[in-house]
Image (cartoon, helix red, strand yellow):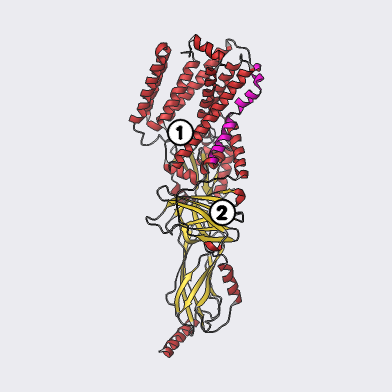
Amino acid sequence: MTLLRQALLSLIALAAFSFAAFAGSSPAYVSDRVTARLITAENGVAPGAQVISAALEVTLAEGWKTYWKSPGAVGYPVSIDWAGSANLKDHELLWPAPTRFEAFDIENYGYEKAVTYPIKLMVDSADDALVLSARVNMLVCADLCVPEDFSLSLVLPTGTAIDRDAATLIAQAANKIPVPADASDIVIDAASLDLDAKRVELALSSANAFSSLSVIPDLGPDAAFGPPQIALQDGGSKATVGFDILSAPDAPPPLEFVVTDGARAAAFAPVTSGSIQQTTTDAPGILWFFLLAFIGGVILNVMPCVLPVLSIKFTSVLKAGAQSPARVRSGFLMSALGVMAFMWALALTLIAIRAAGGSVGWGIQFQNPYFLTIMTAIVTLFAANMFGLFEIALPQSWNTKMADAGSAGSLRGDFAIGALAAVLATPCSAPFLGTAVTFALAGSALQTVVIFTALGLGLALPYLAVAVWPQTVRALPKPGKWMGTVKWVMGLLLAATALWLVSVLIGVIGWTAALIVAALLLGAVIAVAFAPRARAGISAAIIACALVVPAASTPPAQLVEEATSNWRTLSPNSISGWVVEGRVVFVDVTADWCLSCKANKALVLDRAPVAGMLASDGIIAMRGDWTRPDEGILTYLKENGRFGIPFNIVYGPGAPKGIALPELLTKDAVIDAINKASGAG
């Protein structure tokens, strides 16, 4: 029986000789995208051998990639069918540590340029030749994806020769296989997996500081993740890493990670627990973002969208003109404190929402109809006060007491002015602001508080400057009739702000409900103007009634589209398809409450030559309206590293990952991005 078996294997080997080479390499498969061959360290099956060291060596053409065992959002891993092989008992394909890459803003894990997969081949008998017939199927992608399906054959006779070149290649590939956790100097301190919140988090440390940390999550081949959020602490010796889960199987396998850092690569299968909190902050990084947030806050003071805020500030300056330097200083410090108090309150609110699993973003309070109604009421009453329809007059005894106590009541008013100024600044964006806010909302609670503190300090800088140099108010003209004109101008600005807030409310709760709210607030103004003794109770009752309207209203099914039909509704999943067809995709994420967005439209997007380019056949213009809460838009923003708007990005054959534009658009910036994305620039 043994002789018959040996004769059969000899016949198989002889038959294979016509299409397969003896020695450690098969003939190569070559296409326009892939060159592949099967190699073995041994040129023959040595006496007593149980395992043959082999590998699938793949070289990819420029720009092409292939996939890891857990490929990410798209793709599939390489597979090898060994049917037709002889004297092969078993086999094991090993996976080198992958790299992460994006195709059309889709997160994937795999290899580019070249990859060698080590393979352990277990022979059935060391006394016989080994005949290998490998049917390989793999997917390679560049601007498009192409399956490669090919066969490789190799025959190893009995013998002890070694192919040193092949052995060296296989050894180098084996060094790229992640080592087990207990063989690595990288330690997983904690890991969390929350399928309900769609979130994965990891805390790790190393005695050798991380220099180029990369973490690849593995929850099975059908799972997909967003880009990692990595924060280094303690000089790089510790790190926290978070991923949003975009999709996962109903019953996923145990969570695994591959962690790489330069030449280091390790595989982990940690026990998952609750959420992970960062305890320390990387000082150089947060100091840089602190500076960006401060500069962004300063710039907000001179943005056109903050004009109502400036009017309130100017009014406070007029009031300060006849006061002592000490009173001027204390008043402006209180206004600065009002700005800071709102920023701290906003930061804590966003932290609480995030901890509860909610969605956060810059300016999202303007999506809330109750917030909008209250803000509209406050601004409307401010405007009525400026127009002189009513004055807040306190009893003489109260005025005397407050004068004796250092005008405490007026200080409270200064605090309120600062807080209101900060509130009205939040729907605006400015250079540096988007980057800083993104860092704050994607980071730890401490980072969020630090960045919002810097933003508040920048916004409060004019108040702080006057507090340091109170004598500057002496440069103002002396009080006179001109102040009445100024108050009317300020009233008109605040009335315009109130109308703008009503227009935002229309987009959130619809025309009918918003007009009812506006009518009620107008009634409150009339009431406080003609019923001075009961103004507090009447206005409170009417505002309370106004707050009932959003609860009873039904939001409009769809916001009113732009007058032009050139804009399509934002559909992130369709972007890659348009790009593959050679089209340029321009994305504009906007909202009715975003004044910077409206400025971009009026000054750039709706004007020639940009408007003409966006209407041309080769460009797909997409607009996402974030006036009301929309999880799809928020997810898209987060995937692009943004938590606020305006957000504009251009995709195309020349920029499949997209070219993000600054918060404030210019004609030249848009045209240049479109040309680059099209491949012309």
Residue 413, magenta (yes or no): no
Q: Which mark is residue 434?
A: none
Residue 318: quarter of image: top right
Q: Which region of the structure is painted magenta?
A: 446-474
Observer-nearest residue: 457 or 58?
Answer: 457
Q: Main secondary structure of the magenta part?
A: helix
Q: Which mark is residue 365?
A: 1
Observer-nearest residue: 146 or 310?
Answer: 310
Residue 178 showing in the rendered view: no
Residue at horizontal 42 percent and vertical 36 percent from the top = 628
Name the residue furthest left.
Answer: 552
How many residues crowd around disc 2 within 10 Å: few (fewer than 14), some, or many (20 or more)?
Answer: many
- Where residue 612 sits in the image (x, y, percent)? 51, 39
How many residues crowd around disc 1 within 10 Å: few (fewer than 14), some, or many (20 or more)?
Answer: some
| Vertical arrangement, residue 443 with respect to residue 118, above or below | above
- Where residue 330 sits in the image (x, y, percent)? 60, 21
Residue at horizontal 53 percent and vertical 62 percent from the top = 182
- Where residue 402 sits in the image (x, y, percent)? 53, 14
- Where residue 19 sits in the image (x, y, percent)? 50, 79
Secondary structure under badge 2?
A: strand
Secondary structure under badge 1?
A: helix
Q: CA distance from mark 1 to mark 2?
A: 38 Å
Residue 177 showing in the rendered view: yes
| Vertical arrangement, residue 591 with respect to residue 116, above or below | above
Q: Which mark is residue 205?
A: 2
Residue 460, magenta (yes or no): yes
Residue type highlighted by circle 1: Gln
Residue type highlighted by circle 2: Ser
| Vertical arrangement, residue 354 with respect to residue 98, above or below | above
Residue 454: quarter of image: top right
Quarter of the image with the N terminus in it:
bottom left
